[in-house]
Amino acid sequence: MATVPIITQPIEDFLVSENAVDTTVDLFQHFDDPFTTGQIARFELFDSSLGGGITNVLLFDQPDAGASATVQNFLNYVNDGDYTNSIIHRSVPGFIIQGGGFTVEQLEVESVPTDPPVVNEFSDQRSNLRGTIAMAKLGNDPNSATSQWFFNLADNSANLDNQNGGFTVFGEVLSEADLASVDAIASLPVFPASNFFGQSAFTDLPLIVEDPANPVVDNDGNLVRYSNITVSQENELEFELVSNSNPELVNVIIEEGELLLDYAANQSGTAEVVIRATDLLGDSVEDTFQVTVEEASVNPPNVDSNADLTVYRLLNTDTGTHLYTASQDERTQILETLPNYVSEGASYVSVDPLTGNPEPQTVYRFLNQDTGTHLYTISEAEKESVETNLSNFNLETESFFAYAEQQPDTTPVYRFFNTQTGAHFYTPSVVERDSIEDNLPNYQSEGIAYYAFPLSE
């Protein structure tokens, strides 16, 4: 089964300045196993002498590429305990072993109570190959599968993939060790056992008997019986560092699916990093990206050493909206000529007044002519989008400088959108952010607008 994991979004190259804060990346946002979320079914036999008695099966439960409805149907039976004491009632060596239809306790045979049939989800990307598990169904109805399933003992794709819409494969054994119990069952003698139990379906019943020539069935242990089938959740992928060409520049750490880039102090240069993602069946894919650490500039580019660095917040008492400016002249003019504006004091420092910190970027200020409110963005892409698509927004000024990525000692400036007024609100205060999120449902968080420096105590 070709369940090779895929790269959903290549990890982009990183360009940071010397002494940058650590970078974290959620690797699950970049890699995926399109068939599974990591659910594993554990089939446990009463008789552990049959190849160890355990078969672990990776379930293909992902929507689209997987068989999510079929897996959910299977899980319904598992969760209801319907497979406890269930038996393998059909064995065709070299072809399949089949179960899920009957339980036996004290030699009393009961049919598993069935739920409504599940829709057929056959895909040629999930073919009936050796070691896969598929749903049994009626020969003339592709959407008739209920509780019964079978393990493929061989490559049955030429036959079962083409019969009446195909048989839906919904999982695969994890390893050769897990296949051992399946093969052990297939090696048992098979009997036409309708005389034993009065079940017409028991035409190829595998039995555990001492003398196949004279089979005696006098206890439940003569049948291939599962004590239980349970399901657990694992990470669908495991990640590892394949190579790092410059560990003196950046230490690469992977923990619980998170990639951490820890930059060495006072170092600049380039590193090539290769990350491998391996799925639960042992298939893998690799991605390569570069990390470039530039020397820190003593004076930040495009920042006038005499520029105003403190960003002030002004409240429009008529509209409840805010205006932010780093210009003392503009702040003074507004307060002197517009009585509906009151000062709420200094909000934060846009650029480190001592070092400037490396590579600050322009924060652009737009005026919404319809509402009189302002939008601030550090994103060139958002700036271009606003200019192209929103004719009622005018670019007023390159308002001040800030940082698109977190720098040492900087703090996030959070952006909110007021769904009632269409205005935006910005704050570096976590307390104020939390208060807004808890108490003002008309304010939607738009995440971090940019990074700046907190005011000195």
Image (cartoon, rainbow, N blue to C red):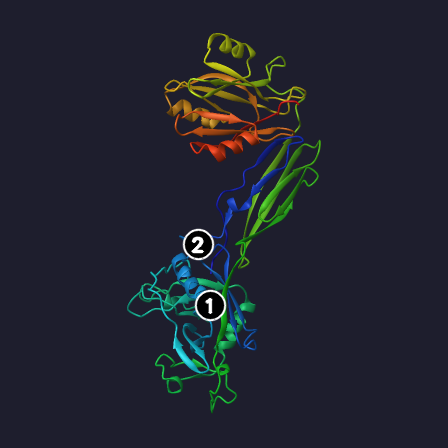
Residue 258 screen position, x and y as percent: 58, 45
Q: SS of the residue at dot 1?
A: loop
For the C terminus, the quadrant is top right
118 lies above or below 206: above
Q: Position of residue 165 (x, y in %)?
A: 32, 63
Q: Nearer the viewer, residue 110 or 432?
A: 432
Compare residues 26 and 184 and report the one nearer the observer: 26
Q: Nearer the viewer, mark 1 or mark 2?
A: 2
Name the kind of residue labelled 1 in the image.
Arg
- First-in-chain label (1 vs 2): 2
Looking at the image, residue 117 sits to the left or right of residue 406; the answer is left
For residue 367, above or below residue 47: above
Task: Give the percent coordinates (x, y) of residue 2.
Answer: 47, 58
Is residue 96 visible from the viewing direction of this image? no
- Frontmost residue, 77 versus 322: 322
Taking the spot 44% from the left edge, 78% from the top edge, the residue there is: 104
User: Does residue 397 lie above or below 428 as drawn?
Assistant: above
Which label number is shown at residue 410? none
Q: Which corner quadrant of the image does residue 97 belong to? A: bottom left
| 273 relative to 232 in the view: left or right | right
| Most distant residue in the bottom direction | 214
Residue identified by numbered label 1: 130
Residue at 57% x, 73% y is: 52
Splitting the image into 4 quarters, where does residue 54 fall?
Answer: bottom right
Q: Judge whether residue 383 can be spotted in this image.
A: yes
Indicate the secondary structure of the residue bearing disc 2. loop
Q: Nearer the viewer, residue 336 or 35?
A: 336
The residue singled out by tag 2 in the image is 62
Q: In the image, 164: left or right of 451?
A: left
